[in-house]
């Protein structure tokens, strides 16, 4: 009986699955927006054409709710999903994802070592850092510390909802070296230090849920600076908006393709995992959506001006690699403290 | 005769069936939510030996350590990860501790000293506290987290500073709902009056305006307010253009933006019931009052207003209860200090995978609604409205 609510939660998804019962399309879940548009052009459509199959797309918003429900009801409505590292790790450990044999995947040798995961194929490198509107910011900020300078740059500041990414950026703004960030954050004093630093701009903070929000806020002059994903800013720049992304101490993290446990089209999904590792296809994706490729040969295949926008090479020399392991262990406790701090 | 009676009974049952089905469909989810809030089967079923051990004796001893290792070894690998994640909701680091201990259980001496030698965390009473509290089939931890009242280490209960977070959010939810209700009533009353008593043309215009807004999606109306109120939005541009202000005002991402947008979204729910009630108040009563010497203000206050209060109560109650559950509008127009309880419920379901906590917060919201309904009923009795004297409906 207690499963009733979980059942109700996916009734819509179950209905969709029932309609598509039998040999259904390859169902791919991704983050939507121009991210997914770029994936469609670089991967989904050419893959479907090559294999002579049809595919259906859906949106995934992070977290494990959908994967957990699929595993509990046995009604697996997705064949492929692209997830953040921390969610990938937890889902993999709990058996919500297929643990596949990497020997069956091609292109492994060309991938960054961090892209090779037990249940996931790392595919997209995301840069998270400071962005601003060149027309309205006045003098352009040059370091993360400028985010906290409310005298020189008065006005609201945007941050991602929740502690992840933010606390790392805060500590680096406070002078902690990237290599020390997680060591400091793991201690009670380090955590206090991060929140004390945040206290100095608390009344100016505004939190976003969707990656499109910081771009809109900057364009509409609702915030003077904001934490953002790098490619969203580049995409806006190409649309003629006067936005810029600061490559000082950015955080980079990897999104990985994974297969939900017992997915009906598992074999086809496995072929897709090899397909996305190809350097030229990753270069095509990154040219359209300037997140980094995980294939180390891909940047060399791109136009230099496109490659210069990626979270790779000298752009991430002062950067920090996001730690999935830290956050899977500390997310609950720190999120609780974060929420507490926000509501006080 | 008995046959006739049983036929009658069958017919009666058939008539009751739809109501019974309705009640069941309504109550089942409530019961399951309550169950989710307390149910700890996921954890307790996986620690049968340890659970029995803790039932027999209170202490953390070598037998408990052996029971823990035996249970962890008996568990499939993925269960250890799930158990670890749930423990981790209470104490950071528990996830990797459980996974690691489980994976290497065969090589660990089944004593407290052996466990502590493997990982010093097992020497910390706090670690065992979490394990011990959570191998029982029923858990109060979600309720404790929601109310902030936790068992103190030395017995009794305590409330640490800041632990009242969900109580504060509940209070905030109440305050925002009350602000919105008050505003919708103040704005809605004259509009409803115009729609109920104006010329047919006025009535049509007001009703159309209300219904158009009513039929537009909440998301669209909320986004429209973002466009109107933002820094370079229409309102700020206009105020600067007429030289009333020189710098744009912060009208959004704060309480002001939240309350304005929510008031607009909920206004029809206040106006429509008021129109209904006002239409039933005979115009002749006001004329009679005037002809007996009362002025327009006295006529309104003593004749019209008391009769329209029923509409105000229905409209206000509807708005308040709907406002309690709002999520999208505060998320888009409010600041971090304006998020309501539903925001946190969604967060626990979607990001935290913590259905127990989501259930408890839903129950808190439900209790608020029930409290409102009871208050409403008491108020109605105090004001002397009942079927006999209520008159209009």
Image: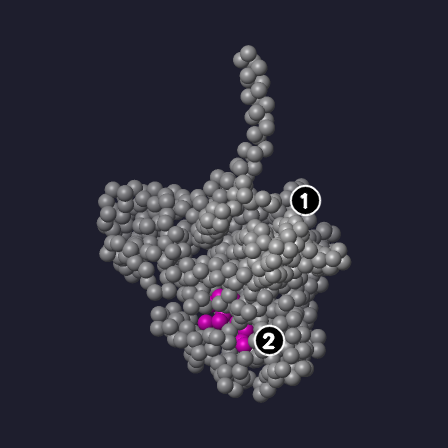
Q: Position of residue B197 (x, y in %)?
A: 69, 55
Residue ID at (57%, 15%): B4
The colouring scheme, among rainbow, by chain, secondary structure or one colour, is one colour
Q: Secondary structure at mark 2?
A: loop
Q: Is residue B33 visible?
A: yes
* B329 sits to left or right of B172: right
Q: Earlier in the sequence, mark 1 or mark 2?
A: 1
Considering the image in quadrants, where does the C terminus of chain B appear?
top right
User: Going by the picture, which residue comes out furthest to the front?
Assistant: B292
Give the spatial CA distance, label 1 vs label 2: 44 Å
Residue ID at (65%, 71%): B228
Residue denoted by label 2: A222
Q: Position of residue A183 (x, y in %)?
A: 39, 72
Q: Quadrant of residue A122?
A: bottom right
Q: Are marks 1 and 2 in contact (CB under 8 Å)?
A: no
Query: Which of pointers 1 and 2 indicates the residue nearer the eye?
Result: 2
Q: Position of residue B242 (x, y in %)?
A: 67, 82
Above or below residue B228? Residue B110 is above
> On residue B305, which mark appears?
none
Residue ID at (54%, 41%): B387
Residue denoted by label 1: A20
Q: Secondary structure at mark 1?
A: loop
Q: Which residues are magenta?
A: A156-167
* B187 sits to left or right of B118: right
Residue ID at (61%, 55%): B292
- For mark 2, name the chain: A
- Within 10 Å of disc 1 (Cα), the crowding (few <14, some 14-19, many 20+) is few
Q: Is residue B7 magenta?
A: no
Considering the image in quadrants, where does the N terminus of chain B appear?
top right
């Amino acid at each position: 009986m207690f499963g009733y609510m979980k059942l109700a939660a996916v009734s819509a998804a179950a209905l969709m699955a029932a309609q598509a019962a039998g040999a259904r399309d390859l169902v791919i879940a991704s983050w939507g927006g121009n991210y997914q548009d770029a994936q469609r052009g670089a991967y989904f459509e050419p893959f479907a054409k090559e294999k002579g199959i049809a595919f259906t797309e859906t949106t995934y918003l992070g977290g494990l709710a959908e994967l957990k429900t699929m595993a509990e009801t046995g009604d697996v409505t997705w064949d492929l999903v692209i997830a953040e590292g921390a969610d990938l790790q937890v889902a993999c450990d709990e058996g919500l994802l297929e643990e596949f044999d990497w020997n069956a995947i091609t292109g492994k040798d060309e991938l960054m070592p961090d892209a090779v995961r037990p249940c996931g194929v790392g595919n997209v490198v995301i840069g998270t850092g400071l962005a601003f509107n060149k027309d309205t910011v006045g003098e352009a900020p040059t370091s993360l510390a400028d985010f906290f300078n409310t005298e020189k740059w008065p006005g609201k500041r945007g941050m991602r909802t929740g502690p992840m990414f933010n606390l790392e950026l805060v500590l680096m703004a406070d002078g902690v070296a990237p290599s020390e960030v997680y060591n400091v954050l793991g201690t009670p004093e380090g955590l206090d230090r991060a929140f004390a630093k945040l206290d100095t701009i608390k009344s100016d903070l505004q939190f976003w849920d969707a990656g499109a929000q910081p771009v809109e806020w900057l364009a509409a002059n609702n915030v003077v600076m904001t934490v953002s994903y790098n490619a969203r800013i580049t995409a806006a720049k190409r649309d003629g908006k006067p936005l810029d992304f600061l490559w000082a101490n950015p955080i980079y993290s990897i999104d990985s393709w994974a297969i939900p446990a017992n997915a009906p089209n598992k074999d086809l999904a496995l072929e897709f995992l090899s397909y996305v590792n190809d350097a030229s296809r990753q270069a095509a994706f990154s040219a359209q959506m300037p997140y980094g490729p995980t294939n180390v040969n891909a940047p060399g295949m791109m136009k230099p001006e496109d490659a210069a926008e990626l979270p790779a090479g000298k752009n991430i020399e002062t950067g920090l690699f996001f730690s999935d392991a830290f956050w899977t262990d500390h997310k609950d406790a720190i999120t609780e403290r974060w929420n507490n701090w926000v509501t006080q | 005769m008995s046959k006739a009676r049983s036929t009658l009974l069958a017919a009666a049952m058939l008539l009751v069936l739809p109501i019974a089905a309705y009640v069941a469909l309504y109550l089942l989810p409530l019961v399951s939510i309550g169950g989710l809030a307390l149910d700890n089967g996921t954890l307790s079923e996986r620690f049968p030996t340890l659970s029995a051990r803790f039932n027999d004796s209170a202490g953390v001893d070598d037998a408990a350590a052996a029971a823990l290792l035996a249970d962890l070894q008996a568990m499939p690998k993925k269960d250890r990860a799930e158990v670890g994640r749930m423990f981790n909701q209470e104490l950071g680091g528990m996830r990797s501790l459980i996974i690691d201990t489980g994976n290497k259980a065969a090589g660990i001496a089944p004593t407290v000293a052996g466990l502590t030698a493997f990982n010093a965390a097992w020497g910390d009473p706090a670690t065992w506290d979490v394990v011990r509290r959570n191998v029982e089939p029923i858990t109060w931890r979600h309720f404790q987290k929601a109310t902030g009242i936790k068992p103190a280490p030395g017995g009794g209960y305590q409330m640490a500073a800041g632990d009242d977070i969900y109580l504060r959010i509940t209070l905030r939810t109440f305050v925002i709902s009350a602000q919105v209700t008050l505003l919708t009533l103040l704005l809605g009353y004259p509009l409803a009056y115009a729609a109920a008593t104006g010329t047919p043309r006025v009535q049509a215009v007001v009703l159309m305006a209300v219904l158009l807004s009513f039929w537009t999606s909440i998301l669209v109306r909320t986004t429209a307010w973002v466009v109107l109120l933002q820094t370079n939005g229409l309102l700020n541009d206009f105020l600067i253009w007429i030289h009333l202000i020189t710098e744009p005002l912060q009208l959004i991402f704060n309480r002001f933006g939240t309350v304005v947008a929510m008031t607009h979204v909920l206004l029809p729910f206040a106006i429509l019931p008021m129109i209904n009630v006002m239409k039933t108040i005979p115009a002749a009563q006001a004329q009679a009052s005037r002809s007996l010497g009362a002025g327009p203000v006295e006529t309104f206050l003593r004749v019209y207003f008391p009769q329209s209060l029923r509409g105000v109560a229905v409209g206000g109650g509807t708005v308040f209860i709907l406002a309690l559950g709002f999520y999208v509008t505060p998320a888009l127009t409010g600041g971090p200090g304006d998020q309501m309880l539903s925001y946190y419920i969604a967060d626990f379901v979607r990001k935290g995978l913590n259905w127990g906590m989501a259930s408890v917060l839903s129950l808190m919201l439900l209790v608020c609604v029930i409290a409102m309904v009871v208050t409403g009923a008491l108020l109605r009795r105090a004001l002397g409205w009942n079927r006999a004297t209520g008159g209009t409906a």
